[in-house]
Amino acid sequence: MKIISVGGSIIIPQTGFDIPFLKKFRSLILRQVEKGERFILVVGGGATCRYYQDAAKKVVNLTDEELDWIGINATIYNSQFVRMLFGDLAHSEVITNPNKKIKTDRPIIMAAGWQPGCSSDNDAVLLAKTYGVKEILNLSNIEYVYDKDPKKFKNAIRIEQIDWKSFRRDIVGYDWKPGKNAPFDPTASGEAEKLGLKVSIVRGTDLKEVDKAIQGKKFKGTVIATN
């Protein structure tokens, strides 16, 4: 069983649907399914989530919990969209409770957000715990994690391997805010550290590298793990 946390902006970028990419991503997963692989795909809210959150904040004052619920519903909608792309190969329902193990003969399970206080990354971590999986593949809009924003700092250092303690202290911090854009969210990072999980971050649109990561081959990206 492979658990893949798919950034919502990979599936539905701000520029609109990338149909050729969606076809290639679908084909990649189907090729692995034909080889006998099984997947849990956790789809995030991405730009869709932040679009709704930003609009709501301009109209009324919302609590962090209310903003999170907007995000959770965005992940459910995005996950339903992807589920339909896989037809009968996907389990008939989108899973929203990551602590409940389901029985299905379908090779693809779609999952979404569950509770406020974190992003869908945390649901991927809880699903790993529920299904006894020790590694998560995180498809992001970045190729590597950097010690600081490479768009703002020319001397930003690329990170290929990092432990959880350093990642939390130096990169993502410890606090979650709705709509926070982080390589892997702080709440999820804390739980992943406790469980001793390995998280591989790879640019989701680079399907050659995604394919390598799925197969356990060396890929371009960042690996976060316990020392």
Image (cartoon, rainbow, N blue to C red):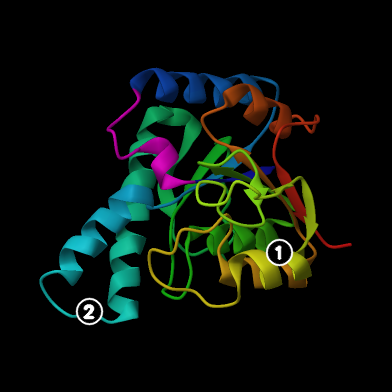
Q: Would residue 107 be found to the left or right of residue 82 on screen?
A: right
Q: Quadrant of residue 164?
A: bottom right
In this rendering, the count of numbered labels is 2
Q: Quadrant of residue 56?
A: bottom left
Q: Would residue 86 be found to the left or right of residue 4 on screen?
A: left
Residue 103 visible to the viewer: yes
Q: Which residue is mark 2?
A: 62
Please, what is the three-letter code of the amino acid marked with disc 1? Phe
Residue 191 visible to the viewer: no
Q: Quadrant of the C terminus?
A: bottom right
Which percent across, then down, holds residue 123? 54, 61
Q: Depth check: 21 or 89 in front?
A: 21
Which percent across, then down, holds residue 135? 74, 50
The span from disc 1 to disc 2 (Cα, nearest Å) is 30 Å
Which percent across, then down, holds residue 119? 47, 63
Q: Quadrant of the N terminus?
A: top right
Which stretch appears magenta? Answer: 7-18
Q: Would residue 65 be found to the left or right of residue 113 on screen?
A: left
Q: Depth check: 133 or 67 in front?
A: 67
Q: Residues within 10 Å of mark 2 (few under 14, many from 20)?
A: few
For image coordinates 24% across by 54% down, the residue present is 51
185, above or below 16, in the image: below
